[in-house]
Structure formats: C-alpha cells, structure tokens
Image (cartoon, helix red, strand yellow):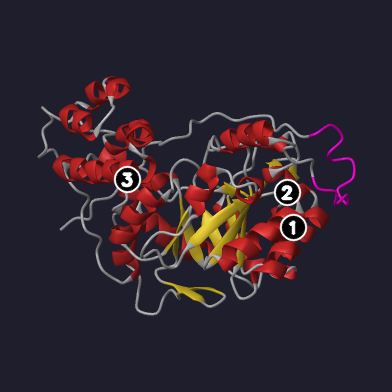
C-alpha cells in the first residue's frame, strides 16, 4: 500500500528501533519527541485535548501573559487553568519583566503545572515596538535575567524557551541567545527557523536548527515546516535536533499526531480521514469549544477552524460562505449538509498554507533599542487594565 503523502515524503523510512530517544525535559520524558506548538487563539484545551487523544507527546497551551495572569484577567486565568486528566500540563508564558515572570512561574508551579515555556519569539509589531517578544533575544543580558528569574522560581519544573533566528537577516540572535538560556538553566531551546521579519513566509531554515543542535548540550527542538508526519523524521535526521515542534501543519488536522506516533514507533502511519471523518472531528471540536467558552464565543472561534478542516475538499467555498451565520452546533451541522462525506482527503491539502499568509515585515523596535545590546532594563509593561487588554489582543495575532 502506497503511503498517503506528498511525493517528497512517500519513501521516507519509518523510525528504526532505537533510532530516536525520548525528549528529556527535567523529570519529563516525552515520547514521541513531538511538541504541539503554543499558538494564540488555537491551542486552548478544546484543541489540545483532541490532539492528545490522537497521539502522545507534549501539548502546550496557547500563550498567556504574565501580567494578565497576575492581574487576574478572566480569560488569561481560564486559558491557564488545569483541566481534568491533562497530564503533563504545559503552559507557555509571555513577559518582559523578570519580577513578573518569576511571580507567574511560582504561581503556576504551585497550581500543578508540569512544564513552562517562555515566548521570546512573538513577531507582532505591537509587541516588538515595546521591546518584547522576538526583540528580547537582541538584549542577551535582559534575556539572562528573565530566564534566571523563571528557573529560580520553578524548582524542579523544567523551563524551556522558544525563539526565532533573529530580528532579520542582518541581525541573527539565536546562537548567543540560546547559549545564554542554557547557561541560566533552561531545559531546552525551541528554534523557529525564521526571523521575525519573515513572519511565516518562505521556507524554514533547518540548517540553523542543526547549528544550534551541534552547539548546545541541552535539547534543541526544531520548529518550522512540519506539514506531514515524515517531515518530522527528515528534520531530526538532517539536523540532529532532539524533538520537533508542530505548528500550522496540524491546524484542522489533529490526527497528524496519530501519524507522528506511528512513524516514531516504526509503523506506517494511518491514512487521514475522508470528509465524513473530518466533519465528525470538526463537530466534536466545536462541542468542546462551546463547553469551554460558551456557545457564542465557542462558535465564533469555530469559524476559522472550518476553513482549515475543509481546505481542499469540494464544496469548501460554499461552506466558508456560510460561516458568518454560524451561531450554534445545529448551524454547524446544517452547514455540512449536501457535502459528499465519502470524498477522500485531498493530497493538495497536505502542504497547503494554513492560518498565516506569506507576507514579510519590517520589524518595529523602540527608538534606539539596538544602541546598547548590553542594556538589561526591562521594557515598560502595560500600565493599566485597558492597556493590558489591548496587549492581550495584540498577542492573539502572533
């Protein structure tokens, strides 16, 4: 039987016995060495729980802000709260002040979190313009203070950091920033093989991931262009990284984790579902969103997911045209009526772009931000509730 994959992945060998090791993060041993990327507005419990049911690995929450958590923002607290049966419990945090990060890590550890990832790669202009996100690795001493504060507050809970290659092709920061993170006690570094200027355009630079894997003694996790399960094996074989981070490739395709688990265990991956199976997954996803956020908010969030679930299928344009009228689970069921549920999964959808477009940007930084890379002064955080709400919304676009 021919593997259902794009031509570049049809002949990639499954993992040989003992070829890959579990991903070791402190006391956590993760098998297969696969991490669901934290994605704002995406990796809430509804989607994480679906992915977890398809395969093992580490499933990270969407990013929460340290300030939002410490100020008791209701949505931030909802996204961070533990859910029944979710182990290991993994959360990504965002912040640019060492005191904030230390306090939020201590609070999350006390609440039973098993792993905390720090976001130093957000490329959203509203964030970088304030010196946060992917701007922070350009200030290695500030990065050191931030990682030191988190590790100091975490006890035995592993702290990992996620970053991009740099600001742009003229200012690559990942090598020094990763060494600093390692020296300050981070358990692993995740590298997205693009700069902040690239956003999600072009191809990810797997050679940069290989460079880092060869240089560090702690695990390096590769992120970028894992569209199909065999891509993960190709990345690990070509870069020597210790694990992969799966982002946009799993949007509308949580069964990708079943395919990954099979390949890493030395088996051929199961074929993807036909349209009827996809619809069943989408409807279950919607039910979980409603349970988590309520019907109004849950169904509003579901609108973007329908485009991802139905991408490449016949009739998907008609489905997308009706999304503005989506208000309830019954509306969703009606939206799918008339589709040919026996239609097989389209090969064209395997590597089709999802979520983020192909544009690039000029990264906005505070005036004079790069004048003194040794400056370790934290950026000015949001000063009041209104600013904090705007900050949270900005991060949701990252």
| In contact (CB < 8 Å): disc 2 and disc 1 | yes
Q: Earlier in the sequence, mark 3 or mark 1?
A: 1
Q: Secondary structure at mark 1?
A: helix
Q: Earlier in the sequence, mark 2 or mark 3?
A: 2
Nearer the observer: mark 3 or 1; the answer is 3
Separation of marks 2 and 3 at Cα, in angstroms:
33 Å
Circle 3 residues within 10 Å: few <14, some 14–19, many ≥20:
few
Label 1: which residue?
146
Q: Is residue 171 above or below residue 53?
A: above
Label 2: which residue?
96
Q: Secondary structure at mark 3?
A: helix
Q: Which residues are magenta?
A: 366-378
Q: Nearer the viewer, residue 52 or 73?
A: 73
Instruction: Identify which residue is drawn at 72% across, 31% down.
Output: 364
Q: Is residue 369 magenta?
A: yes
Q: Earlier in the sequence, mark 2 or mark 1?
A: 2
Q: Quadrant of residue 176?
A: bottom right
Please indicate whether residue 158 sits to the left or right of residue 300 in the image: right
Give the image location of residue 320, x and y in percent: 29, 24
**Mark sitting on residue 291:** 3
| In contact (CB < 8 Å): disc 2 and disc 3 | no
Q: Is residue 89 magenta?
A: no
Visible residue check, residue 151: yes
């Amino acid at each position: 039987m021919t593997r259902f994959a794009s031509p570049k992945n049809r002949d990639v060998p499954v993992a040989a016995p003992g070829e890959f090791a579990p991903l070791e993060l402190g006391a956590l041993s993760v098998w297969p060495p696969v991490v669901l990327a934290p994605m704002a507005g995406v990796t809430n419990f509804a989607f994480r729980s679906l992915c977890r049911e398809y395969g093992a690995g580490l499933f990270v929450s969407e990013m929460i802000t340290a300030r939002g958590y410490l100020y008791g923002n209701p949505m931030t607290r909802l996204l961070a709260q533990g859910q029944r049966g979710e182990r290991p419990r993994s959360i990504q945090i965002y912040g640019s002040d060492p005191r904030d990060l230390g306090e939020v890590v201590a609070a999350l550890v006390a609440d039973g979190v098993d792993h905390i990832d720090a976001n130093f790669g957000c490329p959203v202009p509203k964030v970088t313009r304030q010196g946060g996100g992917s701007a922070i690795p350009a200030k290695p001493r500030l990065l050191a203070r931030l990682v030191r504060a988190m590790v100091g507050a975490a006890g035995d809970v592993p702290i990992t950091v996620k970053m991009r290659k740099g600001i742009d092709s003229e200012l690559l920061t990942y090598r020094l920033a990763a060494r600093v993170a390692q020296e300050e006690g981070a358990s692993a570094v995740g590298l997205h093989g693009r700069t902040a200027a690239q956003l999600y355009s072009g191809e990810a630079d797997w050679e940069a991931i290989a460079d880092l894997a060869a240089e560090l003694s702690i695990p390096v996790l590769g992120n970028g262009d894992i569209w199909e399960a065999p891509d993960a094996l190709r990345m690990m074989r070509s870069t020597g990284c210790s694990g992969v981070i799966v982002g946009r490739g799993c949007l509308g395709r949580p069964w990708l984790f079943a395919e990954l688990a099979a390949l890493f265990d030395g088996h051929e991956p199961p074929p993807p579902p036909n349209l009827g199976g996809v619809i069943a997954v989408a409807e279950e996803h919607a039910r979980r969103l409603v349970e988590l956020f309520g019907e109004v908010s849950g169904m509003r969030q579901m609108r973007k997911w329908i485009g991802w679930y139905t991408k490449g299928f016949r009739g998907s344009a008609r489905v997308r045209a009706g999304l503005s009228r989506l208000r309830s689970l019954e509306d969703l069921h009606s939206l799918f009526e008339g589709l040919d549920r026996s239609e097989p999964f389209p090969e064209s959808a395997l590597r089709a772009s999802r979520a983020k477009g192909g544009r690039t940007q000029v990264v906005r930084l505070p005036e004079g931000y790069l004048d003194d890379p040794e400056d370790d002064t934290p950026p000015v955080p949001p000063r009041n509730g209104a600013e904090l709400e705007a900050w949270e919304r900005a991060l949701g676009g990252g």
